[in-house]
C-alpha cells in the first residue's frame, strides 16, 4: 500500500482508484481474487499480486494475474513480495501476460536508471503507450544485465569456455576450464573496477586510481593527489596503502556522494584496517576495509552503531552490494 500510495500516487482509500481483493469471474474460476486493482480514468490499468516478504516470485503461484489479464482492460501486471517488484505487460501476444517481466527492481537496492520507467506508472504521469512501446526493449536489456551480473559473480561453464576459446591456443579440457574459471572472474572484476574508476574521474572531477591488468603488489603510495586522505594520516613506514584500498575508498566515496559532498569523505590507513571516515572524525566511521588478508577479505559497516557489521567480500567491487548500508550510516550521522 505505501508503494501504491507514495510511489505511484494513487489514493489507496478511494475505491474508484484502488480496489483490494479485486474480483472478476474468469471462466470456471468464480470469485477468484487478485490482491489489488489500480484504476485510471475509470478503467483497470494495473493488477498487483502480493506474496509474503522474502518469498520467491514464481509465476506458477500467480495464476490469477494471467487469468485476470485476459478478461480486464489491464495492460500492466505487477508481482511483488514487498521488496522485489516484477512488472509485466502483453508484448508477446495481445491480451496475454508475458512470461517474463519487462521491469524488475528491488526497493532496497534500487537501480536509478529505472526510475523514469517506474514514474510512467504513476497517477500524475501515467503513460501506458510509452510503457508498452519501451517494454520489449526493457525486457531484453534488463534480462541481459541480470545475466551479466550473474556471470560476473559466478562465471558459468559456457562463459569460461567462450573466453578460453579466445585466449588459449590449446585444447579446452576440463582441467583447463577449471584453471580458467577464477581467471575469468578476476578479469571481469578488474574490468568493472576500471569502468568504475573512469566514472569516478567524470563524477568527481579527479583522477581515479587505475587498475592494472594484473593484480598489483602492495606498495607505498607516494602520490595521493587524486584521493582525499585524512589531514593527519599516519606516517608509520610499516603502514602500506595499497591500490586495492584506494580503489575501495573511491567506490565508497562514489556511493557517499548521494548523501554528502565528496570532500567530506576521507580515509585513515592503519596496520590493522583501512578506515573511511566522515568529516575526518574517528567517531564517524563510514566503513572499514580489511583487505590485506591472504585468503579472507571483509569490510565492516556501521549502520547499526559502533560495534559494526561484518560483510565478507571477494573483491572491492562487492562493496557496491552494501551501498545502502553505507548511505544509511552517513544518514545516521547527519
Image: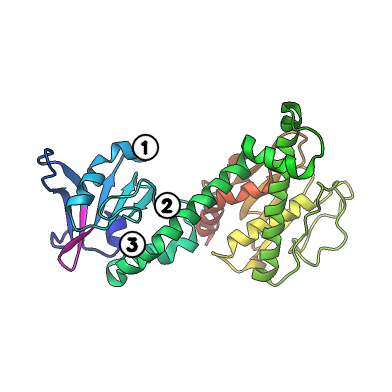
Percent of width and height locating residue 269: 77, 51
Residue at mark 2 = 104
Q: What residue span does the magenta drawing correspond to?
A: 37-45
| Residue 246 showing in the rendered view | yes
| Residue 314 showing in the rendered view | no
User: Residue 41 colored magenta?
Assistant: yes
Task: Give the foreground label among 2 and 3.
Answer: 2
| CA neighbours of label 3 inside 10 A, class few (<14), some (14 to 19), many (20+) | some
Residue at mark 3 = 7
- Give the residue at x 40% y 54%: 102
**Display colour scheme:** rainbow
- Count of numbered circles in the view: 3
Q: Quadrant of residue 176?
A: top right
Residue at mark 1 = 55
Which SS class for mark 3? helix
Percent of width and height locating residue 142: 48, 54
Q: Which of 261 and 87 is in front in this view?
A: 87
Picture layout, residue 309 above or below residue 38: above
88 sits left or right of 228 in the view:
left
Which SS class for mark 2? strand
234 sits left or right of 134 in the view:
right
Percent of width and height locating residue 143: 49, 50
Q: From mark 3 to mark 1, how far is it between C-alphas?
A: 22 Å
Q: Nearer the viewer, residue 195 or 5?
A: 195
Which SS class for mark 1? loop
Task: Give the foreground label among 2 and 1.
Answer: 2
- Mark number, residue 115: none
| CA neighbours of label 2 inside 10 A, class few (<14), some (14 to 19), many (20+) | many
- Give the residue at x 57% y 66%: 260
- Give the residue at x 88% y 60%: 222
Picture layout, residue 303 above or below residue 119: above
Amino acid at each position: 500500500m505505501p508503494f501504491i500510495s507514495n510511489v505511484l500516487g494513487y489514493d489507496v482509500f478511494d475505491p474508484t482508484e484502488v480496489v483490494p481483493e479485486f474480483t472478476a469471474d474468469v471462466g470456471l474460476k468464480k470469485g477468484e481474487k487478485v490482491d489489488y486493482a489500480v484504476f485510471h480514468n475509470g478503467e483497470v490499468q494495473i493488477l498487483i499480486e502480493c506474496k509474503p516478504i522474502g518469498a520467491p516470485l514464481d509465476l506458477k503461484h500467480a495464476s490469477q494475474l494471467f487469468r485476470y489479464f485476459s478478461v480486464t482492460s489491464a495492460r500492466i501486471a505487477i508481482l511483488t513480495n514487498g521488496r522485489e517488484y516484477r512488472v509485466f505487460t502483453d508484448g508477446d501476444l495481445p491480451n496475454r501476460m508475458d512470461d517474463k517481466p519487462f521491469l524488475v527492481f528491488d526497493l532496497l537496492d534500487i537501480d536509478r536508471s529505472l526510475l523514469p520507467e517506474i514514474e510512467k506508472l504513476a497517477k500524475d504521469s501515467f503513460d501506458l503507450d510509452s510503457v508498452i512501446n519501451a517494454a520489449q526493449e526493457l525486457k531484453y536489456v534488463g534480462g541481459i544485465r541480470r545475466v551479466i551480473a550473474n556471470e560476473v559473480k559466478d562465471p558459468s561453464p559456457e562463459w569460461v569456455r567462450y573466453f578460453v576459446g579466445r585466449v588459449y591456443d590449446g585444447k579446452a579440457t576440463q582441467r583447463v576450464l577449471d584453471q580458467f574459471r577464477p581467471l575469468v572472474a578476476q578479469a571481469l572484476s578488474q574490468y568493472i573496477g576500471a569502468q568504475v574508476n573512469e566514472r569516478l574521474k567524470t563524477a568527481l572531477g579527479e583522477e581515479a586510481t587505475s587498475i592494472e591488468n594484473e593484480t598489483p603488489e602492495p606498495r607505498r603510495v607516494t602520490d595521493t593527489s587524486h584521493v582525499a586522505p585524512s589531514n593527519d594520516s599516519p606516517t608509520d613506514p610499516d603502514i602500506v596503502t595499497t591500490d586495492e584500498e584506494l580503489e575501495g575508498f573511491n567506490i565508497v566515496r562514489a556511493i557517499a556522494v548521494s548523501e554528502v559532498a565528496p570532500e567530506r569523505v576521507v580515509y585513515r590507513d592503519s596496520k590493522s584496517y583501512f578506515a573511511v571516515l566522515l568529516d575526518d572524525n574517528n567517531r564517524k566511521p563510514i566503513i572499514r576495509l580489511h583487505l590485506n588478508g591472504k585468503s579472507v577479505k571483509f569490510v565492516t559497516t556501521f549502520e547499526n552503531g559502533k560495534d559494526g557489521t561484518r560483510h565478507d567480500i571477494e573483491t572491492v567491487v562487492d562493496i557496491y552490494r552494501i551501498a545502502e548500508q553505507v548511505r544509511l550510516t552517513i544518514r545516521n550521522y547527519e
